[in-house]
Amino acid sequence: MVKHTATHILNFALRWTLGDAVEQRGSHVTSDRLRFDFSVKGALSVQQLQEIERTIQDIVQKDEHVHVQELPLTLARGIQGLRTMDEVYPDPVRVVSVGVPVSDLVNSTGLLPTSVELCCGTHLLRTGEIKDFVIVAEKQLVKGISRIVAVTGEEAREAREAGLALAQDVESLSVRLASVIPSLSTAHRLSKEVGQLTDAVDSTAIPQWQRRELQAKLKALQRTTNTAVRKLETKEATRKVQTLLEKHVSETLVVDTVDADSISVVMKTVNQYSERSPGAFVMLLSHQPCGKVLCACQVPKVKRQTARACSL
């Protein structure tokens, strides 16, 4: 009953926020969540998702009465703002209205801001029994049709708490990235943390509007860490090249090992060495703790225009 009544209120909130063009295209209710498909031009914005949730929360917090009354089908269809599905209804038909008595809707000549539908299902007596409502997913199924997944009650409270915890984790990581990153290993570790947080934000049941905000922040943090990694790798490669040049003075065939944690550093070292010593054939290897060997090599451009990298 909780999810069913919440679905009616969601239907109203979507139309109230997005306009009369919104039409229900399907719904499904289980014990732990509800699903609602509807017509819309594009994905909902963060602001629209927040407004829809606020509208529903207002109705829940007001603890409004859920009115149910049977009416002749022709009379029911004359109610302003009535929501119906493309199906055959019995006559008489059951009308479910939130907050406004059905008799008031029948006698009204104008549109009243309330959820009113033809429905034969069971419902709550009052909206306060929903307790809480959170949209945890929203995506387009096909062009012009979107799907919302939402939770209520205890599941909604848990989603809000999970969202708050993830927001704090993202903020903490953002503060750490704002300072100078001292080493390449630190940059790699922070980049990995961004990836792990991104996975958590993508997969955890949290408010969808908050997910969108955190995803945008994490994308920016990922760009920051990627830039830091590239700069630090270039600096490390420059130091290694200087050591190699001093060791292999005037040599045209250079085969050596370097201490590096990634193929990217090995490649950058090979490329920089070739730029500093354009006539040299270069092969560098780096033994890894896991037993693998990273290998990068390059021949003079006048001999061959390609460079290769491999992991052995």
Image: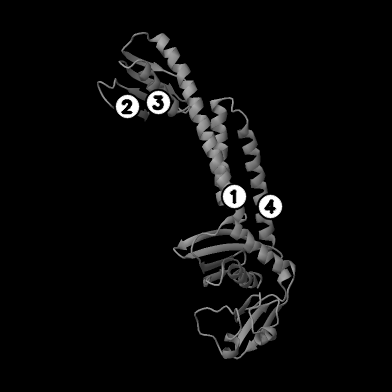
Q: Are there few (<14), some (14-19), or many (20+) residues within 10 Å of tag 1?
A: few
Above/below status of 239 relative to 53 = above
Earlier-in-chain disc, 2 versus 1: 1
Mark 4 — residue?
161
* Spatial separation of the CA atoms under disc 1 and disc 3: 36 Å
Question: For residue 13, which quarter of the picture?
Answer: bottom right
* Spatial separation of the CA atoms under disc 4 and disc 3: 45 Å
Earlier-in-chain disc, 1 versus 3: 1
Q: Amino acid at mark 3?
A: Met
Mark 1 — residue?
213
Above/below status of 49 relative to 164 = below
Considering depth in this image, is 43 or 163 the residue closer to the camera? 43
Residue plotted at (69% across, 80% down): 67
Mark 1 vs mark 3: give the one in front: 1
The total of numbered circles placed on residues is 4
Earlier-in-chain disc, 4 versus 3: 4
Earlier-in-chain disc, 4 versus 1: 4
Q: Amino acid at mark 2?
A: Ala
Relative to 189, 299 lies left or right:
left
